[in-house]
Amino acid sequence: MKRVKLGGSDVEVSEICLGTMTFGNQTDEADAHAQMDRALEVGMTFMDCAEMYPVNPVRLETAGRSEEIIGSWLARTGHRDRVELATKISGPGQVLREGRPFDGATVTAAIEESLRRFGTDRIDLYQMHWPVRGSYAFRQNWSYDPSGQVKQQTLDHMADVLGALEAARQAGKIRAVGLSNDSAWGLTRWIDTAERMGGPRIAAIQNEYSLLCRLYDTDLAEAAVNEDVTLLSYSPLAAGMLTGKYSGGAMPEGSRAAVDVGHGGKGNLGGRKTQRGLRAADAYVELARKHGWDIVHLAIGWQLTRPFKTVPIIGATSLQQLEHLVAGLGRVPDRDLCGAIDDLNREHPMPY
């Protein structure tokens, strides 16, 4: 598998990343180990996690379990030097630390805890899961209100956190730094602040990006290209919408939506599963069929054609699902098919 650098850092990773957010919940430890074994076999060495994982649902009593499962795999296989590990500190409103915002001291402590769970001495990419000032991610764009933000307070927070991250980098505990669920303004201010104080420069930003969710395409893409930042795209299959399995109102047993309903949730895939979203997903499934593609493979391959640095994060709840994903790796759509995708995007803009 092709190798790429994360932004302007010296961290080299596989061009596809294995997502691990279901490890310890929908995916048991044995299957998770099998997935990591298989990923390594095909050259997928980059693995993304977070201190609050597993998800669906996120619970305080299970937080950290996904990191622990990766740690048990590393201990069993001795493959630490063959993989690149990414993880994230939780943000405000999440389950850890009673949902309090993080600061520099929190980051320092959280890095130590993640290192302990992984059973390693270093994290290759350490990310801030959510900005403390708020975010428009996960359908919050429909009512986003930044008017309560205080610029100097935000800049002071960034400086405090970057100081802690630089200390961790100097100590060899982290190698590169990234954001998640952030905006073009946030990305550039983190970079400006790091340059002003000599802190670690942002190498990656992990935001949602798929055929159905293309908020990244404009301001963020421009900022990332000019500042040499790599997009780590999460939910490239739109939480399973771009498999066709929810077409016609279907609710497959064991699917993410069904599990969510089973835990008292709405089963709407984080606001993605709308009538407009389902119609758009069906249109992409049909386009793939007409061109002789599996929609799953097209959704991933298309990302590698984008005019900015992108590393898609693919996650699977089972080894069987991962094998399906792996079967399409290395294939990208041609210019004509990409043009047809753009036409569908105009027909179904922002479907959720």
Image: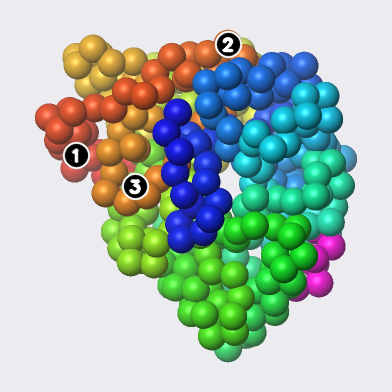
Kind of residue indicated by mark 2: Gln
Residue 4 coordinates in the image, percent (x, y):
44, 44
* Colour style of the rendered protein structure: rainbow
Q: Answer left or right for 219 relative to 107.
A: left
254 lies left or right of 211: right
Query: In terms of image quadrants, where is residue 292?
Result: top left
Q: Secondary structure at mark 3?
A: loop
**Label whose residue precedes the other's in the sequence (1 or 3):** 3
Q: Residue at x 72, y 40 (%)?
A: 53
Name the residue tied to disc 2. 320
Could you tell me how far apart the alpha carbons at marks 2 and 3 are, in whole angstroms? 28 Å
Q: Is residue 105 magenta?
A: yes
Quadrant where the N terminus sits is top left
Q: What residue sits right under mark 3 in the picture?
A: 214
Magenta stretch bounds: 104-110
Foreground: disc 2 or disc 1: 2
Residue assigned mark 1: 342
Q: Residues within 10 Å of mark 3 (few under 14, many from 20)?
A: few
Q: Quadrant of the C terminus?
A: top left
Question: At label 3, which amino acid type do we have?
Answer: Arg
